[in-house]
Structures are given as C-alpha cells and as structure tokens.
Amino acid sequence: MIALGAHAEFIIAAYVGVFAGLAALIGWTVFAARQTKRRLEELGDGQRANSSAQ
Amino acid sequence: MTIDTTPKMTWWNRLSHPGQFVALTRPLVLPLALLTGVLFAVGLWYGLFSSPPEKYMGDTVRIMYVHVPTAWLSQFVYATMAVSALGTLVWRHPMADVSMKAAAPLGAAFTAMALFTGSLWGRPTWGTFWEWDGRMTSTLVLLFIYLGIVALWRAFDDQLRAARVVAVFTLVGAVNIPIIKFSVDWWSTLHQPASVFRADGPTMPGEILTPLFVMFFAFTFLFITLQLAAMHTEVRRRRITTLERRAARGDAR
C-alpha cells in the first residue's frame, strides 16, 4: 500500500465511506430484485418473474 | 395477395411495453456489471497506487477520484429524472415514470456521497468540513429534493397519479441543476471553477486526468447498471400490485 501522506485518515475515510455506500446500494438493489421475484413466484407468475414482467 | 395491416413494432414501441423493455434490456445487466467492475479495479489501481501526489494538494487529490464522479452523478441522475418527467408529462411513455422512480434513491445516495467526500476533502484543503457557499448549499438542497421525491412516491397508492405529481415536482426542482453548475461562476466560493471541461482544454496533468476519467466512467456505468436493475424491479413490483388487486377482487366475489 502506498503512503497517503499527512492526511491519510481523510483519504481512507472518503474511500471507505463511498465503497460502503456503493455496497449498500448494490445490496439493496439485489435484495429488492430477489424479493419481487419471490413474490411473483408466490403469486403464480414465476415464469414472468424470470423474464418479462408484464 | 394479402396486405399485412399489423402495425410495425418500432424500438420505441417495444421500449414502451414494460415486458418488452425488461426482455430487451435484461441481457445488458451482466455485461454492464462486469464492465463496471473492471473500470473500478483499473480506476482504484490508478487512483491509489499509480498516480502521483498533486503539486499543491499532495495526496488529498486522491479524494477527487471519488468526489468528482459522485458529484457528477448527483446532477446527471437528476437530469435523467427530468427527461423522464418530460416523458411522463409530454409523451406519456409508460417506462418514463418507472425510470423516474428507480433513479430517485440512486441520485440521493450519490449526492450524499458527494457531500461526504467533499467535506472530507475540504477539511485538509480549506481547513473546514463545511462552508455555506453556493455549490455546497445548492448540492445540499439537491439532496433534500431527492429525499422529497422518494417520500412523494411513497405517499401515493396510485402510482400513475404519483407519477404526474412527481414529474411536475422534478421539473420544478430541475432549476437547481444550473444553479449548482454555475454557482462557482456567479458567487464568491471556496470551490475552484471548471478545470476539466473548458474551452481551452483541461488544466490538470494527464496522470491525474487518467484516474479521474476511469473512475468517472466506472461510476457512470454503475449508475446505468443499477438503474436498469431497479427499473426491472419496479416493473415486477407493479405486476405484483396488479396480481394482488386481481386476487383481492376474486376473493371478494
């Protein structure tokens, strides 16, 4: 790892904060997608849950 | 001889059908996700290991590689929502309000990240985490607009009615985007004026521009990927509502 100079804590906090936020955003998107697929399957619309959903 | 009177399905027609839209765009999600992953890997390698410290700011310039792309997306996502709002109000495109609804939480998240990284960059550079200057204040206002839009979507059971109200609110809020962009020119501010997209070319050296552009594309492709996935989820969510209502009507009979 490179030396980040006198303000390393600010640089590390910025990257950790952003990538934690991105992980949460991706996780939430995947969770919501799976939840709606599961619900469509429960409603007997499983084929559409996996392809077109109209 | 028979004459085919069936209307031709143009790409615009196909995109206006939620099921067709999902079928057309679903195969794009995985390649976009892979491309985004590669861009982030390259951008992080350049940004943290390969690019040199800047002459005046030293290593804190590395915060720029996550701050500028998130700040760009905070405005780009809103522009996407404003175009979608026009799609809802003017063309009544069925996917326009789906796009508006999917983009709002993503825009809020990118704006929060831009404010967070900006304050962390401001402390070592300007000596303060926060300053009520034009750009920071208008970006904070943008975050509140996003949160208001997310709340507005949740306030309505009828999503078609919600779409029209949100579309009007989104277009009114769009006035904030040029304010953010030109605030550094209009008012006295700690922020520097544009240093990349200028008539006389960028003022930054190539070794700083390269990681900045790679991260810029990484974040932009991430938004496109998440936006498509969130739109697919919203289409399914509406299908669920339809099926649940149909089931409830069936039970009531």
Image (spheres, coloured by chain):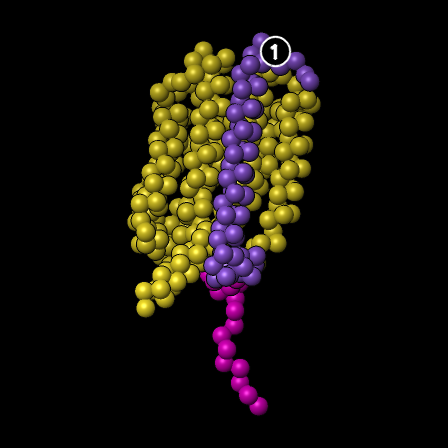
Can the viewer see residue B234 in this picture?
yes
Q: Which residue was labeled with disc 1?
A: A5
Colour-to-chain, yellow: B
Which residue is more in the foreground, B142 or B106?
A: B106
Point out residue B76 in the picture as x, y percentages from the top left corner.
47, 39
Colour-to-chain, purple: A
Q: Residue at x 34, y 49 (%)?
A: B167
Looking at the rendering, the stretch of residues picked out in magenta corresponds to B1-20
- For the C terminus of chain B, the quadrant is bottom left
- For the N terminus of chain B, the quadrant is bottom right
Answer with the quarter of the image where residue A23 lies.
top right
* A44, above or below B68, in the image: below
Residue type for callout 1: Gly
Magenta stretch, main secondary structure class = loop
Point out residue B238 in the picture as x, y percentages from the top left corner.
42, 55
Q: Residue at x 49, y 51 (%)?
A: A36
Q: Give the left or right position of residue B204, taking residue B179 as reference.
A: right
Chain label for disc 1:
A
Q: Residue at x 57, y 57 (%)?
A: A50
Q: Residue at x 47, y 59 (%)?
A: A43
Q: Give the left or right position of residue B186, taking residue A35 as reference.
A: left
Element at badge 1?
helix
Point out residue B229 in the picture as x, y percentages from the top left corner.
53, 48
Which residue is more in the foreground, B190 or A1?
A: A1
Q: Is residue B158 magenta?
A: no
Number of numbered callouts drawn: 1
* B135, above or below B161, in the image: above
Classify mark 1: residues with Cα within 10 Å, few (<14), some (14-19) or many (20+).
few
